Image: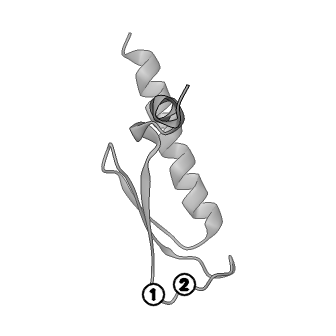
C-alpha cells in the first residue's frame, strides 16, 4: 500500500481544521489564542488557550461522528 492509498484512510477531510493564531501569540502554551475553523462544516470558534482549542476540535469531531451514525 502506497502513501497515496492511505491518504483517504488517515487524513479524512471530515477531520481537517484551519487554525489561525493571533499575531501576539507566543510559542509557549501560556498565551495561545486565535481562531479555528472546521473545513467541512464551516463551524468557527475562537480560543484563548490550548484547552479551549482542543475542546472545540473534540466537540466538532464528536458531533460529526454522532451525525454519521444517525444517517443510516
Is residue 43 depicted above or below 47 in this figure?
A: above
How many labels were placed on the picture?
A: 2
Q: Give the farthest residue toward the front.
A: 2
Residue 31, percent from left and from top: 62, 82
Residue highlighted by disc 2: 25
Give me the residue at 50% from left, 90% from top.
Answer: 24
Residue 2, percent from left and from top: 53, 31
Name the quadrant containing residue 12: top left
Is residue 71 depicted above or below 15 in this figure?
A: above
Q: Give the farthest residue toward the bottom.
A: 24
| SS at circle 1 | loop
Closer-to-camera residue (21/53): 21
Is residue 63 depicted above or below 46 in this figure?
A: above
Give me the residue at 41% from left, 17% from top.
Answer: 70
Residue 38, percent from left and from top: 39, 50
Could you tell whether 22 is left or right of 52 in the image?
left
Residue highlighted by disc 1: 23
Give me the residue at 45% from left, 87% from top.
Answer: 23
Task: Classify 10 Å Cα crowding around label 1: few (below 14), some (14-19), many (20 and above).
Answer: few
Q: Give the farthest residue toward the top.
A: 72
| SS at circle 2 | loop
Is label 1 in contact with label 2 (beta carbons under 8 Å)? yes
Give me the residue at 43% from left, 47% from top.
Answer: 16
Residue 14, percent from left and from top: 41, 38
Colouring used for the render: one colour
| Figure quadrant of the C terminus | top left
Task: Classify 10 Å Cα crowding around label 2: few (below 14), some (14-19), many (20 and above).
Answer: some
| Figure quadrant of the N terminus | top right
Q: Which mark is residue 65?
A: none
Amino acid at each position: 500500500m502506497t502513501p497515496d492509498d492511505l491518504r483517504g484512510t488517515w487524513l479524512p477531510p471530515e477531520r481537517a481544521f484551519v487554525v489561525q493564531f493571533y499575531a501576539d501569540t507566543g510559542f509557549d502554551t501560556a498565551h495561545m489564542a486565535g481562531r479555528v475553523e472546521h473545513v467541512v462544516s464551516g463551524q468557527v470558534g475562537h480560543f484563548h488557550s490550548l484547552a479551549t482549542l482542543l475542546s472545540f476540535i473534540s466537540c466538532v469531531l464528536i458531533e460529526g461522528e454522532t451525525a454519521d451514525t444517525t444517517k443510516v
